[in-house]
Amino acid sequence: MNFSKERGYRGRLAPSPTGFLHLGHAKTFWVAHQRAKQNGGTLVLRNEDLDRARCKPEFVAAMIEDLRWFGFEWQEGPDRGGPFAPYNQSGRFHLYRAALEKLRSGGFIYPCTCSRRDIQQAATAPQAGDDDEPIYPGTCRGKSDEWRVTSGGKNGTMLLSPVTCHSSPFSWRFRVPDGEAITFTDGNSGPQTFVVGKDFGDFVVWSCRGGNEVPAYQLACVVDDSAMQMTEVVRGADLLKSTARQLLLYRALGLRPPAFYHCPLLRDAAGVRLAKRHDALSLRELRGQGKTLAELR
């Protein structure tokens, strides 16, 4: 276990309120809950509400209600406060911007105007995995902060800014060190190795669309887990590759990574991993069917 006796164990539940929690969430979260309890540690509830289009207040209320019904107990969170508030990601943009600026000034990121369709057409084939993301072909790699795009603004140009969004959509991508092997030992799955440029490519850390700024999961997760002093991150096995990406961000930002524990995914009868579209297996639907906590656990 990668934590000091002085600081103690700190784990977290980090749901995104884009729908109702299902049994797959409960399984992974229960592992996190039990590991914090077994280590006499602190469990944090973090509301990952950065997706403005899909995150709804009603899902936040349902999330807290369903977690409590299932028997989860956390010591810090949006409903309880704590020393690392706010616990809603929507209130932590200043931290993400500061991290983005550090990456920009260190030369780790570059602006990219490629759409997902552009990348899929340029890539030889999509890579199966946690996000089914094709490896970025490096189209915009040579562009720097001083690169300008036609915008209809003054003199027909616009300077891309790391903290300001304009009408022209673009993203900031992390420039990965091609060929480097990223290794770590997972608390559940054991030794892991991902080769940069082969298993994943340059990845998005910040998007600007329609004047809206959206920090990517990879960046927000690293910033928050570090700022909230997490000692272990428990999540699904579909995010093993994301851990490799995040380790690069920890290094670039000069931050110490936590330990990781990736849980097997819960799947339906057809072998497909559970998602929020599986309404029949949502916690509130199962509760409505009269399922007991003993049965579900």
Image (cartoon, rainbow, N blue to C red):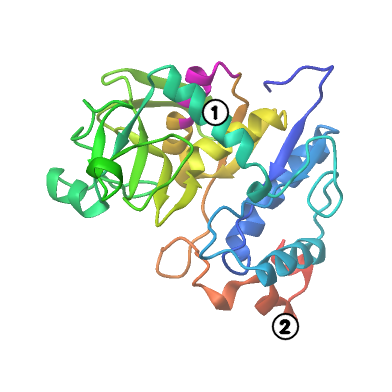
Q: Is residue 266 above or below residue 230?
A: below
Return the x and y of residue 100 as percentages of the image width and height: 49, 30
Determine which residue is flagged by label 2.
288
Apparent side of residue 181 relative to residue 55 in the rendered image (left or right): left
The three-letter amino acid code for the residue at tag 1 is Ala
Q: Quadrant of the C terminus?
A: bottom right
Is residue 141 or residue 271 the one in the foreground? 141
The first of marks 2 and 1 along the sequence is 1
Q: Give the farthest residue toward the front.
A: 155
Q: What is the quadrant of residue 226 in the picture?
A: top right
**How many labels, in total?**
2
Residue furthest bottom in the image: 289
**Residue lying at 40% horizontally and 69% vertically, measured from the top left:** 270
Circle 1 residue? 99
| Image-based side of 234 in relation to 79, left or right | left
Q: Nearer the viewer, residue 7 or 205?
A: 205
The answer to whether residue 250 is magenta is yes
Q: Would you say 79 lies left or right of 240 here?
A: right
Q: Residues within 10 Å of mark 1 (few under 14, many from 20)?
A: some
Question: Of discs 2 and 1, which sits in the foreground?
Answer: 1
Spot occupied by residue 122 in the image (x, y as percentages of width and height): 13, 44
Coordinates of residue 105 in the picture (x, y in percent): 44, 19
How would you rate the neighbour count of disc 2 (Cα within 10 Å): few for under 14, some for 14-19, many for 20 or more?
few
Q: Secondary structure at mark 2?
A: helix
